[in-house]
Amino acid sequence: MRTSTETSLVPYVTLRAGEEGAPANLAITPEWPGNWPRLRYIDEERADRDVRGVLWARCSHTRRDERGMPTGTPRWKLMHPSRQRETMQELRCQVCVRPARTPLGFVFLAGPNDYERDATSIITGQPPVCPKHARAAARLCPYLDGRPMVFIARSAPLYGVHGTLYGYGEDGVQVVATPDQPLPYGHANLRTFLASQLVRRLQSFRLVDLDELLEGSAAAT
């Protein structure tokens, strides 16, 4: 159950009503050197590609409030692609957008049954959270079901992206596949891939519960 405080709290990354994907406006052209096919927007801008050169899905934005937060009815099960990318790239809290680094490491949440408890490597598209908002995020996000797995990671390098693979068909540029798993950076298919979620790999981490996280964070500050 959401508390009265949490009812008005919406994570920064949550998609809002009125935020919609932009028209495709896509083309595939040869890229020099090698003349490899490359997906692009006809009116492409620098911000359309991430730090590794992968093309990203466009999505409209609602207006911001006085705190700089998005407005509009939350679409709880969805994340805005550019806000997810921003918080994951810069390792900022997915709720408040403040830097997520803590003395213990970065805190990442996952669904209660997403991973084996003895997993040694975790791949996630969920941006980190700060300790202040860890419990709220667990309650607000349907994906976390109020009882998340909590990972404290010392190392979380960029891994790749989730998204959609494009190619040529009878109607020109069209979707040819939507992989279940993220493509790692360096994969050949990323040349004609439209990303919608940035993914990191947790390597040096430990699994804790929420109470242990909050107690440990308080002791470390």
Image (spheres, rainbow, N blue to C red):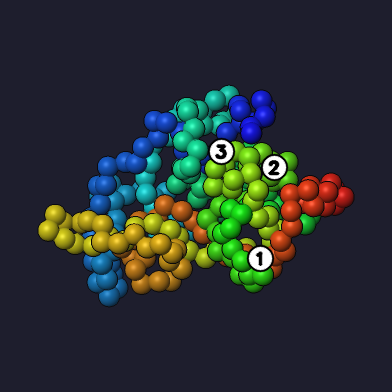
Residue with the mark numbered 3: 12
Image spot of residue 215 (x, y percent) = 83, 48
The one of 50 and 196 positioned closer to us in this rendering: 196
Residue annotated with mark 1: 117
Question: What type is the residue that disc 3 sits on?
Answer: Tyr
What residue did someone put label 2 on?
Answer: 135
Labels 3 & 2 near each other (Cβ < 8 A): no
Q: Is residue 120 above or below residue 200?
A: below
Q: Nearer the viewer, mark 3 or mark 1?
A: 1
Indicate the quadrant where residue 151 lies: bottom right
CA gap between label 3 and label 1 equals 29 Å
Identity of the residue drawn at 26% across and 57% down: 175
Kindly report the distance in space between the C-alpha atoms of the residues bearing marks 1 and 2: 20 Å
Callout 3 crowding tier (Cα within 10 Å): few <14, some 14–19, many ≥20: many
Q: Quadrant of the N terminus?
A: top right
Label 2 element class: helix
How far from the left and from the top, in percent, is residue 204? Answer: 69, 68
Q: With respect to residue 86, does 63 lie above or below?
A: above
Q: Amino acid at mark 1?
A: Arg
Q: Mark 1 or mark 2: name the one nearer the start of the chain.
A: 1
Residue depth check, mark 3 versus mark 2: number of the one nearer the observer: 2
**Residue 170 screen position, x and y as percent:** 12, 58
Whether residue 99 is visible, yes or no, is no
